[in-house]
Amino acid sequence: MPRHKYRILSTKPLPQELVHMAAEHDIAILAQAFIDVQPVITPDMRKHIQELASTGTVLVFTSPNAVKFVTGVWMHDENSLAARHRVYCLEGATRQAAEERMRNVVIEGTAANSLELAKRIVRDGITGKVIFFSGNIRRPDLPDYLQENGIALEEMVVYNTVETPAALDEDYDGVMFFSPSSVRSFFTSNSLPADTACFAIGSTTATAIAAFTANRVITSPGPSVAKLVETAIFYFDNINCYE
């Protein structure tokens, strides 16, 4: 591997096109997964999800993993997925996953975080039950806000997030974090040199980083992996502006 001016650790694997984009700016991105995602869809849940395919329900997703596991149940009969479903999801990777895996469905609304997504659902005057697909670790903002505003909610936990700490044996110029879970897992076994920059995919992840280190935290302007990589590239391309 050619030597680069800067080295960044990504706490999850990245698409190769983003790694190559960073390399063009003399930045090497190396990946080490600090969490593992495991589906937990039981036979009864699978049957219920299959039944939902044709009912025209309000579906809510706040992670691409939830989209992946739910649509995996439908993948053999995608044409049965009701186009009248009203889908609400987070911007960035979650919306991208929804658009790719639910092509018959129009995305009704998006937001940058779960609380704003809940507010959008309330503003749209949704009545009836909302189905929220989630992981075992999620913020309470969305379900709490919906229930406080009288919206019936059914939550289905379709995956578990398992932290997989690993001790590093070298230092990096920057570390990219994609969730509070990855932050906790990383700092379980590691500390950072004072000059290592931390890059957060959103404000919730940035807050989690700040609880473990006083290092500089730069937050992506948008909740997508590509935006976070672009943010890191901009930082190192203009590092003198941050001194």
Image (tube, rainbow, N blue to C red):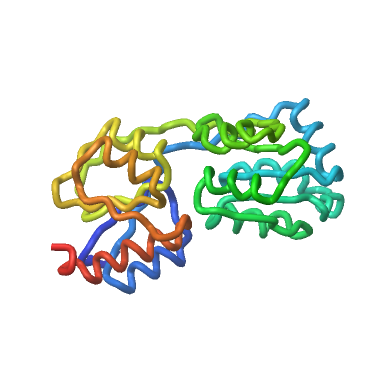
Viewer-proximal residue, 72 or 184? 184
Tell me residue 2's x, y (percent).
26, 67
The residue positioned 52% from the left and 43% from the top of the image is 115
Query: Image quadrant for the C terminus?
Result: bottom left
Tell me residue 9's x, y (percent).
31, 51
Tell me residue 148's x, y (percent).
60, 32
Classify 91 as above or below 240: above
Image-quadrant location for residue 184: top left
The residue positioned 22% from the left and 70% from the top of the image is 238
The residue positioned 20% from the left and 51% from the top of the image is 196
Q: Is residue 50 left or right of residue 240?
A: right
Tell me residue 130's x, y (percent).
72, 38
Q: How many marks?
A: 0
Q: Is residue 129 left or right of residue 4?
A: right
Image-quadrant location for residue 43: top right
Q: Is residue 118 left or right of residue 27?
A: right
Viewer-proximal residue, 186 or 197? 197
Give the farthest residue toward the bottom.
Answer: 24
Viewer-proximal residue, 15 or 110? 110
Query: Image quadrant for the N terminus?
Result: bottom left
Q: Is residue 95 left or right of residue 194?
A: right
The residue positioned 15% from the left and 52% from the top of the image is 195
